[in-house]
Image: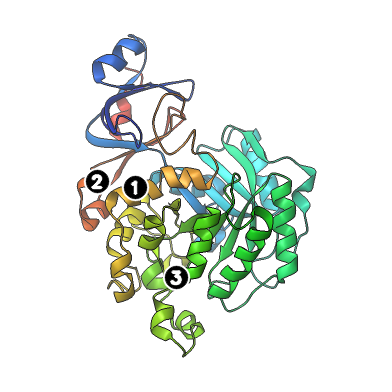
Amino acid sequence: MVIVGRIVTMDEPVTAEALLVEDGTVAAVGTRDQVLALAGDRVPIIDIGENVAYPGFIDAHAHWIGDRDRYGVGSPAAAMNAALSRGWTSISEQWVNRERLDELTKLAAEDALPLRVDAYLALNEPAGGQHFGDWYADREPGAVTNHLSVQGLKITLDNGWGTIVNWEPADLTGAIGRANNAGWQVSVHTVSTEAHEMVLDAFDAALGPTGPNPLHHRIDHAIQVTDDQLARIVAMDLATVIHLDGAAADWVLEPEYLDHLGPGNRGEKIGWLARWRDFVDAGLHVAGATDTPWIFPGLALSDDIGRPVDQIAGGMDGRGRANPKTPASVLDQLLTAEEGLRAVTLDAAYALGDESRRGHLAPGTLGDVTVLSGDVTAGTPDQIRAMTVIATIVGGIPAHCTEICSQFGN
């Protein structure tokens, strides 16, 4: 297939006029004349008109399928359709036990995954402290099919408020060390400064204080980070995964969370929250993610939530859903539209360990494309939130599409 129109590549050239996808992979990017000449007469063409195409958006931390019952969705297909209709071509399922892995594997075998799913195998319950042991040890990390990958592990170190820690330091260090030695990426749910200190000690033991970090081990949520901890994250080059849509205003302004900060040095501790700009300026790979459905107000799915455009716009103005006024502590942590776009493309792909194939459009990358009704790099936050998804294309196949796909096959 050929896509013709304005294409933001997140690569070189920065923008293009046309894109050729063959056998699920990008074969050419360039001017309209160049690409159409390579494609020949029999290749289907989608002309996106005044709309804008981007590398397929990647939700680097979510629970679209596994926690679908929490937000009132009845089937895996409906959950994936909800993600596709919002413009996600890849979703990372961040807590997968044996039952959920069996479900995903069956869906993959039946060719029933219309988008790409990156499954992270859970090593403990998110609450209650039950640990599952190294149940991943009987398999190798990597791709199951072209749409399902299982190369990461998930550790829930503390709870959502940072008030309960689920691991002993020695157990955490041992678990991360064994996973690293076996070639598994580790994603750690880490909210509080106490939890960050513990996980940084564990990664230090596995990687050394200055890395390197070839498996792209990651810290997810990264809500409350001190200056010293940020320096350690940078030194080990740990990927950070944050939630730009509502986390600053809705999560960390909750009374239960703020109570955890305690009375001492309260102003300094508030300054440790939601350090998006500090992460980006420090050169970290900073991925954006929805955490679906856990940041939805009331766990309710609505048409204007859980979207890539919400991540980009939220990073620009720091507004939440329950608290629409930008917190003062976040005003100096806001991102540009380009940085928000990178968070749901290039850096999200890095957080999944697949940055060579996803997050940008160049020959050899996967043919995953999201088409929006506008140019996010030229919009205000509210204009970006108002943009609609015109098409979500996975491997050159329209998985969600409006009227432009009526051209497909012409």
Considering only vertical position in the picture, is 298 above or below 6?
Answer: below
Task: Please name which of the two marks, 2 or 3, marks the residue nearer to the observer.
Answer: 2
The amino acid pointed to by label 3 is: Gly
Q: Nearer the viewer, residue 140 or 147?
A: 140
Q: Which mark is residue 377?
A: 2
* Amino acid beneath label 2: Thr
Q: Quadrant of residue 8?
A: top left
* x 59%, y 48%: residue: 213
User: Viewer-proximal residue, 113 or 141?
Assistant: 141
In this view, the residue in front, 178 or 289, is 178
C-alpha distance separating marks 3 and 1:
27 Å
Instruction: Decide: few, some or many residues near mark 3? Use Cα within 10 Å; few <14, some 14-19, many ≥20.
Output: few
Circle 3/circle 1 CB separation < 8 Å: no
Quick one: SS at disc 1?
Answer: helix
Residue 242: image x %, image y %? Answer: 45, 59
For discs 3 and 1, the disc positioned in front in the rendered view: 1
Measure the alpha-carbon separation of dots 2 and 3: 31 Å
Horizontal arrangement in the rendering, residue 119 relative to residue 83 (left or right): right
Q: Residue at x 37, y 50 (%)?
A: 308
Please tell me which of labels 3 and 1 falls first in the chain.
Answer: 3
The residue under label 3 is 298
Query: Circle 1 is placed at which residue position?
Result: 341
What residue lies at 43% left-to-right and 39% top-to-bottom? 359
Of the 4 image quadrants, the one containing the C terminus is top left
Circle 1: is it few (<14), some (14-19), or many (20+) Cα within 10 Å? many
Crowding at mark 2 (Cα within 10 Å: few <14, some 14-19, many 20+): some
Residue 398 drawn at (x, y percent): 41, 31
Q: Quick one: SS at disc 2?
A: helix
